[in-house]
């Protein structure tokens, strides 16, 4: 299957899931996850109108950034502090902020280039020890702390579901993130918006859309297996 055919199928599935959820498909942003995939394939997606691309390694953003014009890069994987300075001028949104110290580094590097960096807070809903993300009990506190930073804007939350979860478990997990975001919204913390919920990958994006995702991060279904 070509990238075009894959994208047609994914777009249709996003539309169907939105309708099932009583939502407008236009309120859901497809982030095509291009990690490990060559620039030629990314350009095929660009030709189909895709503008948002997700990478989980900073180095890959650095390499691809100069080769493709006019697209928006999303850092969706774990970010080490010493890598922030390499990507700070290149990324639209960092989805994986889960500690105050990482936010401090982003604040520092963003202020050097006079940029206000949009971020999401990654939440570890399931509590699996192996997983990145702040514990759900600590999300509000972290949002309050980061809200004081002049060069960071929190735009919402991100999560990853659990590998072996079935449909209903995924929906429950994603709804939990949605609930946390509504709770934070009610607090009206300055500089903190809860507009975006980044959740759902190839195997669970339909459940995420049902639970309120505004951004779905889809790799395999767009670009094929890795
Ligand atoms: C790789 C990755 C995705 C996309 O995964 P697929 O199953 O290929 O759609 C989404 N989110 C994150 C954080 C990833 O690392």
Image (tube, rainbow, N blue to C red):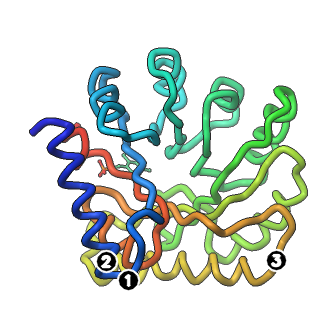
Residue at the image position 82 percent from the left and 57 percent from the top: 146
**Labels 1 and 2 touching (C-beta < 8 A):** yes
Q: Secondary structure at mark 3?
A: loop
Determine the CA span between mark 3 and mark 1: 27 Å
Observer-side mark, 2 or 3, equals: 2
Q: Residues within 10 Å of mark 1 (few under 14, many from 20)?
A: few
Give the x, y percent position of residue 72: 53, 36
Judging depth in this view, the residue of 12 and 164 nearest the camera is: 12
Q: Secondary structure at mark 2?
A: helix
Give the x, y percent position of residue 163: 30, 63
Report the residue marked by disc 2. Answer: 19
* For residue 153, side relative to residue 11 (left or right): right
Asked if 92 appears above or below 88 in the picture, the reply is below
* For residue 10, side relative to residue 130 (left or right): left
Q: Which mark is residue 22?
A: 1
The quadrant of the rendering that contains the C terminus is top left
Determine the CA span between mark 1 and mark 2: 5 Å
């Amino acid at each position: 299957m070509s990238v075009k055919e894959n994208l047609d199928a994914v777009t249709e599935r996003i539309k169907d899931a939105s309708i099932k959820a009583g939502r407008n498909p236009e309120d859901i942003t497809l982030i095509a996850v291009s990690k490990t995939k060559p620039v030629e394939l990314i350009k095929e997606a660009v030709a189909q109108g895709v503008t948002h691309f997700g990478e989980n390694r900073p180095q890959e953003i650095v390499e691809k950034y100069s080769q493709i014009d006019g697209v928006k890069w999303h850092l969706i994987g774990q970010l080490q502090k010493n890598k922030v300075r390499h990507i700070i001028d290149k990324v639209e949104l960092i989805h994986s902020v889960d500690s105050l110290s990482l936010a401090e580094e982003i604040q520092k590097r963003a202020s050097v280039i006079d940029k206000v960096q949009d971020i999401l807070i990654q939440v570890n809903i399931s509590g699996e020890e192996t997983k990145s993300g702040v514990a759900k009990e600590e999300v509000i506190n972290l949002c309050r702390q980061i809200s004081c930073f002049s060069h960071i804007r929190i735009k919402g939350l991100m999560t990853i579901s659990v590998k072996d979860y079935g449909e209903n478990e995924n929906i429950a997990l994603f709804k939990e993130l949605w609930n946390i975001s509504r709770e934070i919204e009610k607090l009206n913390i300055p500089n903190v918006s809860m507009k975006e919920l980044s959740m759902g990958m190839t195997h669970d994006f339909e459940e995420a859309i049902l639970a309120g995702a505004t951004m779905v991060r889809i790799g395999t279904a767009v670009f094929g297996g890795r």
